[in-house]
Image (cartoon, rainbow, N blue to C red):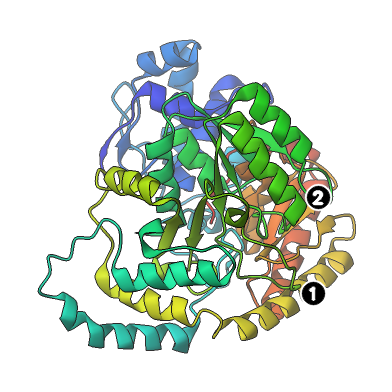
């Protein structure tokens, strides 16, 4: 991908880059470098001119010139000094070097392999993603059945902004069976939950509108909120359990957010389950404030402890619900949905046509089979996840005894409090010891959660043991070099799911 990045866009990606922990040019170079490794600044992208970026950031041109020069020396900019540099990845980098460049000198070839779009080396365990492999035979069988049904749809155009009827009917039946009467015209099929959220944001919220979020929350939801021009309003989850519904009520009445986005079912990243009384209060608070409540139920089926709750939509017809097969069956299906009132679904469909004209038909036919027999792969998957969760909690207790893990009710990951603000530092050097991580600040606003790390239990116990030992090695390395910890603390985290 080639193109150019304007200075305003780059400044937004940089965030609060100038922390004063090192010379300004070095901090600027470090953050740009990791934005490239993270994939948030694509390869072969022309960076802003030195003069334009200096004016936008409010720094001297000398600072930007020195930063660009440092990036060229490291192999992250391809052009000569004075021209528009294009981003690239160096062919060779010093492994484990600890020269004067601070964090910049500590990226090894393994660290590069942790960047999106680059193949990881053999043995690199990826804990940045909380996702499962496909539920094999079940998914295969659904696609085989879909291919036999495809000929009946071939005479049509193939464009359907709402989704094919069999899938919408199957999803509606699932909600009705769960105590939320639903018809097919209350369902819009999407290409995953992220696509669904983007449609909802485009329809319901405008630039500078406020969107309330629980804090921490799903990082790609924060990305979507910011990309739409909206402003996230975070309300912190209390330490250890539950939601601060009083705080959410107060924020709604004072801030009057246009939307509230919450993950009440095995919350990502904490794994918590919101109680029915809290759900009812949240619905009532949103109605009183004129806030549209958007509920992400992507993880609802991963109920490891059999916690019984009603869907949030059972408490109000005004709730907008997002669902997906990505976590329960396979992310490669790229099948999600929105449940809402019929008139609102029509508005979502109209907004969707500005983004795409419909999803792939074969995938939707297969998804209809999976939704109709949703429980088939779950018992075995949940049993395996329970074993993984128990193993990971035991490993953390034995190998990382100064960590404080929060035992999740369900979902795919454990939210851990660290003994020091080292989350990003662990993430940056993790590939050097064989593990790719998701730093706590990616789950928050304003650099929060340096004391936290999300650790998925999606790998089998033997691989989890290898991963936890690798994290122990990374922590020991930081404990032995406090200056390394300080230099890495404010660098961006890698992309995650």
Residue at 66 percent of width and 40 percent of height: 284
SS category of the residue bearing label 1: helix
Nearer-the-camera pick, 69 or 446: 446
Q: Can you identify the residue that label 2 sits on?
A: 417
> Which residue lies at the image location 39% right of the left edge and 45% below the top edge?
344
User: Please, what secondary structure does the residue beneath circle 2 have?
Assistant: strand
Q: Looking at the picture, does residue 429 appear above or below residue 83?
A: below
- Which of the two residues, 14 or 430, is positioned nearer the viewer here? 14
Q: Which quarter of the picture shows residue 87?
A: top left
Q: Around disc 2, counting alpha carbons within 10 Å, would you say few (fewer than 14), some (14 to 19), or many (20 or more)? A: many
Horizontally, is 283 left or right of 137 in the view?
right
Tell me, yes or no, if residue 102 can be seen here. Answer: no
Mark 1 touching mark 2, by CB under 8 A?
A: no
Res. 57 in view: yes
Instruction: Examine the rendered structure and indicate whether residue 82 appears above or below residue 417.
Output: above
The numbered dot on residue 390 is: 1
């Amino acid at each position: 991908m080639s193109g150019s990045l304007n200075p305003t866009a780059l400044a937004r990606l940089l965030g609060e880059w100038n922390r004063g922990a090192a010379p300004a040019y070095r901090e600027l170079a470090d953050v740009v470098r990791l934005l490239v490794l993270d994939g948030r600044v694509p390869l072969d992208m022309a960076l802003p001119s030195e003069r334009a970026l200096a004016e936008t950031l409010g720094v001297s041109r000398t600072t930007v010139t020195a930063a660009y020069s440092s990036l060229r020396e490291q192999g992250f900019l391809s052009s000569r000094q004075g021209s528009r540099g294009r981003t690239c990845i160096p062919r060779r980098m010093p492994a484990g070097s600890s020269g004067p460049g601070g964090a910049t000198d500590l990226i090894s070839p393994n660290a590069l392999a942790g960047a999106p779009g680059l193949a990881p080396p053999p043995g690199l365990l990826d804990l940045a993603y909380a996702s499962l492999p496909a539920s094999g035979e079940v998914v295969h069988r659904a696609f085989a059945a879909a291919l036999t049904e495809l000929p009946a749809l071939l005479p049509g155009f193939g464009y359907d902004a709402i989704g094919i009827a069999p899938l919408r009917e199957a999803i509606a039946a699932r909600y009705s069976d769960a105590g939320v009467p639903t018809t097919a015209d209350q369902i819009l099929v999407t290409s995953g939950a992220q696509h669904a959220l983007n449609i909802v944001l485009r329809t319901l919220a405008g630039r500078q509108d406020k969107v309330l979020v629980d804090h921490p929350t799903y990082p790609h939801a924060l990305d979507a909120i910011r990309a739409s021009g909206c402003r996230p309003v975070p309300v912190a989850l209390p330490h250890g359990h539950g939601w601060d519904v009083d705080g959410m009520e107060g924020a709604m009445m004072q801030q009057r957010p246009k939307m509230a986005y919450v993950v009440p079912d095995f919350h990502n990243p904490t794994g918590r389950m919101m109680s029915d009384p809290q759900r009812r209060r949240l619905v009532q608070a949103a109605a009183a404030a004129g806030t549209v409540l958007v509920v992400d139920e992507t993880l609802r089926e991963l109920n490891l402890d059999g916690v019984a709750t009603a869907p949030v939509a059972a408490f109000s017809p005004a709730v907008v619900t997002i669902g997906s097969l990505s976590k329960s069956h396979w992310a490669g299906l790229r099948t999600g949905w929105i449940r809402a009132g019929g008139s609102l679904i029509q508005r979502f469909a109209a907004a969707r046509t500005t983004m795409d004209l419909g999803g792939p038909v074969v995938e939707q036919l297969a998804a209809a089979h999976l939704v109709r027999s949703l429980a088939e792969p779950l018992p075995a998957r949940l049993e395996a996840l329970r074993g993984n969760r128990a193993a990971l909690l035991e490993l953390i207790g034995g190998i990382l005894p100064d960590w404080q893990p929060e035992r999740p009710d369900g979902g795919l990951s454990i939210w851990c409090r660290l003994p020091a603000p080292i989350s990003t530092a662990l993430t940056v050097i993790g590939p050097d010891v064989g593990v790719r991580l998701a730093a706590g600040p990616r789950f928050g606003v304003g650099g929060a959660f340096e004391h936290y790390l999300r650790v998925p239990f999606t790998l089998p116990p033997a691989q989890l043991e290898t991963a936890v030992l690798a994290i122990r090695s990374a922590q020991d390395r930081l404990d032995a070099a406090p200056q390394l910890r300080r230099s890495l603390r404010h660098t961006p985290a890698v992309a995650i799911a």
